[in-house]
Amino acid sequence: MSDPQIALFMLGIFIIIIFLGFPIAFTLMAMGIIFGYYAYFDPSRMWRAYNRAVEGGADSWTQVELWVDGFFNNNIFDLFINQTFSVMTNEVLTAVPLFLFMGYVVERANIVARLFTTLNVAARRIPGSMAVAALITCTLFATATGIVGAVVTLMGLLALPAMLNARYDSSFASGIICAGGTLGILIPPSIMLIVYAASSGVSIVQLYAGALLPGLLLSGLYLVYVIGRAILQPSVAPKPTAEEVPDIPMGKLIVLLLTSFFPLAFLILAVLGAILFGLATPTEAASIGALGGLVLAVAYRALTWDRLRESVYLTVRTTAMVCWLFVGSWTFSSVFSYLGGEQVINEFVTGLDITPLQFLLLAQLIIFLLGWPLEWSEIIIIFVPIFLPLLPHFGIDPLFFGILVALNLQTSFLTPPMAMSAYYLKGIAPPHVQLVQIFKGCFPFLILVFIAMIVLYVQPQIVFWLPGLIYG
Amino acid sequence: MIHYIKLADRISAWFGKAFAWTILVMTFGMAYEVFVRYLLNAPTSWSLDVSFIMYGTLFMMGGAYTLSRGGHVRGDFLYRLWQPRTQAKVELVLYFLFFFPGVLALIFSGWKYASRSWRYLEVSVNSPAGVPIFQLKTIIVAAGILLLIQGIAQVMRCLLCMRTNEWMRAADDIEETEVMLMEKGAHDVLDHASEAIDIVKPLDTNPTGGRSDKRS
């Protein structure tokens, strides 16, 4: 087999191993080493000292020692360690644990119940008021924490029973929570965009600026759908009775809003503003955010020793999950391209003679399909980099591509067989809410994601306007 | 065998959790940098290096802890449909093919890399502050050794599971009680989710007024 064929063979085996369900980070590492050992195998260089010793008639012990030395004298080991160390000193990825920590702290700040109750009262005159309140709570809370599972389960324990009590359709109610909770990986400051920045080399600041309006566009579309459906089909979202949503005097409502909605919104805006206006690096802004989260938790009297410990330990686990994936992926992909795999794919795709639009559709379709069995972290770290070298050929901006991918990956949480949002919700929902109903409720939101992607393609200014405004 | 698994889980968790606290150093260190830069107009020369070192140490040392709690992401849409015994058989083979080569390479080549750095007590080139980074390179070796210890425990887990058809879970961890909130059925699905999942029950009373007559 020629080297490029070996590279494709390597990719094939890798995909099979993914299907077998072995931890991906270690699979990538080991395959990088094994195939890299082959790729960089150079006996005359590796065993030069050994050969010389044999000729010089050294004693057998020295010969064995030099042979072993030679065996490990393969360049792949240096490459591997260099890649590992470059993940460890990556300037972009340093923000990951801080944003996660901020998320875990905010999640424990007892804020979500307060927020939902307040918005529920504030929105009570709007059609489908509870659904609107749930959606806004999800969006805001998801933006601040960025942790999809937590948002969906917390809201599932809180808003879902409330909506079911108010005779809401269970599909409709669960769809809102799943889709709303998933927004946290899209709207900045989100971890997913940091990860994309680290694998694509696009500036994280530009990505945040570019993702803001598309994120708001998508949540706006969700909101329009929810209100529209409540007007056209009042049976899915009946008006709550006075007993279900108490009428609170305006003054008190303002106080409630001031103590729940605004602190969280302010925290998000402060972090985002500091990044977008260049006052702080994303890492610094994330540390301010984490500190702000701690202050918030203290203010809500929610910061206990146990909760701090939980946040710290969960941060290390999720960070390790993401960053070890990078260690594996960077080793794997440098061996893959050294063997010429990248070039084969490049030549194949450019030989297809397709238009940029067709390429974009194809790429997004593949990412959408990958989202069925896989999760965003694997897709962004391992599969998206395969498309990135092709973008210049088709004249597609990697920033624009990244935003489309981020939108697209919203669907990966909502499509079976690995629809994590739906499973999280099923895990805590009352037993009579069936998984099929949840999927049915998610479906309209999938359509809205596609609509948002089409809108972005037709009007790319939505992505480029804000980065252009800030950086000229 | 059970003893070894428990010991390995404890070692991994101890190191993972101990180094997890670097996140607080990072938070306060970076926030301090922003504070002195804008309010005192005197930026520090060490904060960038400190953030690298803390972050690198955090995730490297957390690798084995995450492994012991099944936290590394996997494409398990087929895997979770299998009997535990089948899972264990497949995993056992894969550990030898696709786990140990990488981890051993991490230890051996990390050793070479770190000892080179120790020889001249390497410092970071990012700033004139001369923040030492040879210890960060040593972390690679330490993380590799922890993963090796934990990997052997995972192999034993597979062997045990092939006999009993049941996975031996890690000792009760801080999250386990919270995951208990989830129903048993969803538990297995969530085990290999992309995030360390955890649920805290809101301390506030039910916002709908504590009505208990759930409509079914």
Image (tube, coloured by chain):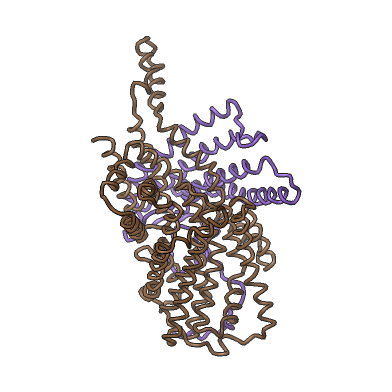
Chain colours: A brown, B purple
Q: Quadrant of residue A272?
A: bottom right
Q: Nearer the viewer, residue A54 or A151?
A: A151
Residue at 43% over, 51% down: A398
Residue farthest left in this picture? A1
Residue at 47% over, 80% down: A227
Residue farthest top in this picture? A56
Q: Position of residue A220 (x, y in %)?
A: 49, 72
Q: Position of residue A111 (x, y in %)?
A: 61, 70
Residue A321 visible in this rendered orientation of the protein: no
In the rendered picture of this protein, how many numbered marks are placed on residues?
0
Q: Nearer the viewer, residue A446 or B187?
A: A446
- In this picture, is B6 found above or below A252? above
**What quarter of the picture does the N terminus of chain A occupy?**
top left
- In this picture, is A100 found above or below B44? below
Q: Position of residue A218 (x, y in %)?
A: 46, 68
Q: Nearer the viewer, residue B58 or B81?
A: B58
Residue farthest front in this picture? A472
Residue at 45% over, 41% down: B148
- In this picture, is A42 found above or below A372? above
Q: Position of residue A345 (x, y in %)?
A: 30, 45
Residue B29 visible in this rendered orientation of the protein: yes
Please indicate whether residue A468 sits to the left or right of residue B80 in the image: right
